[in-house]
Image (tube, rainbow, N blue to C red):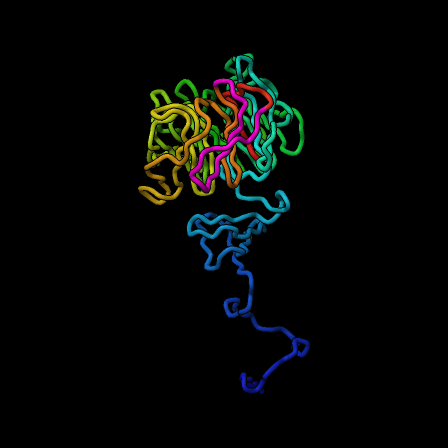
Amino acid sequence: MTQSVSTKMISSLASAKLTGALPALNGAALTGLTVAIGSGAADPTMTTNPATGIGTIYTNHTSGKTFVLTDATANKNLWENIGNGVANISTLCFGGRGGGTQYGYNAGGKNGPYFSAIDKFAFAAVITASGHGDLRVGRSDMSGSSSNTHGFAAGGYYSPNVAANHTKIDKFAFASNTTAANHGDITTAVDECCASHGDLTHGYSVGGKTNIRTINKYAFATSGGTAGHGDMSGSEKYLSSSSSNTHGYITGGAPPVVNTIQKLAFASTSGTSDAGDLVQTHAYGAGFSSNTHGYVAGGSGTWNSNHVQRYSYFSGINQYSIGDLTSTHNQSSYSGNTHCGASSSTTNGYAAGGHPNTDTIVTFSFGTDTRTTDHGNLRTAGRAYCRDNQS
């Protein structure tokens, strides 16, 4: 005989008295949980908006990866991967040119001769950079990107400066002070300040000298060359670049010097699309990435190089377009610095070296509209046309 039990009949029940199989319960009926849990077939993105706030845990039930929400802002959420990173935390990288937590790396460059040296400087300390091995050969004007474990330098000018040397990809480990290794070749030779991006798994080398508008894509995990990822629609050299987790942004360029912003989707091979304009024309500068904005500093154009311009990844003429700037972000304490290296932590941008003949490293905060401050020096003055990475 089956009987129903009401709440009036049981005031308490010890778990030890329960035996047998219990029916399936709806998790929505559970109360008293201090951490909300979600899941899906793919990793969460910045537009994964949980009903709960910071501390929400999300599991990709396809790969088994688990993430925790550390910054809860609608459509701008920051999820951190639990495991495999520094102190078991690995942040979603901001296009390989942002989101670093420990060090910036300044690779190659030239001041008359070509440099092969890689300099390493701490984000947390104002000191002179230390050596971190070398590229395979002296080179400049590369595109640079970063995985969680390695830095990559693709294309650029080599010594000797012959066409065959413009396609090389160097790979160096953040954890060891050794000479970079061969990581294959890019399909189209690039140099002259091409743009560079990276998502969680691939690096992108965009544009270059001699009317090259190709977007080259290469895998971080395996060597062997690049695949085409569409083409640019605008200026092809003297570019700056920033990245969100889903798109790369290409700013300015020459000749002639322009103020355009182009955008490429990491998930699509359709090439770039228009994403608004900088407030002033810009070329030869450095690009930085926070989780919500791109930044352009140094270089030359309508303004002198002592300005930093900022643009949003989210606001503009449509959902992903960034629209137009209305003002500068900050005024830099360095002037005349073109072709400087750029790296980004989760909170600051760092500009290193540059032309003419400077070894200065300066930093500015993504959260405040203030002048840059000194952050030490590279080991060698005049490290222009270099490319930075970050770990």
Can residue 85 be seen here? The reply is yes
Q: Could you tell whether 352 is left or right of 323 in the image?
A: right
Q: Residue at x 59, y 28 (%)?
A: 171
Q: Position of residue 379 (x, y in %)?
A: 60, 23
Q: Is residue 377 above or below residue 322?
A: above
Residue at position x 33%, y 32% from top?
Answer: 279
Q: Nearer the viewer, residue 304 or 73?
A: 304
Is 206 included in the stretch rendered in magenta?
Answer: no
Q: Is residue 214 above or below residue 292?
A: above
Q: Residue at x 54, y 59 (%)?
A: 37
The answer to whether residue 207 shows anywhere in this view is no
Residue 311 point in image, percent of width and height:
38, 38
- Quarter where residue 328 is shown: top left
Magenta stretch encompasses residue 376: yes
Residue interval drawn in magenta: 356-378
User: Which quadrant does the C terminus fall into?
Assistant: top right
Q: Position of residue 216 (x, y in %)?
A: 47, 28
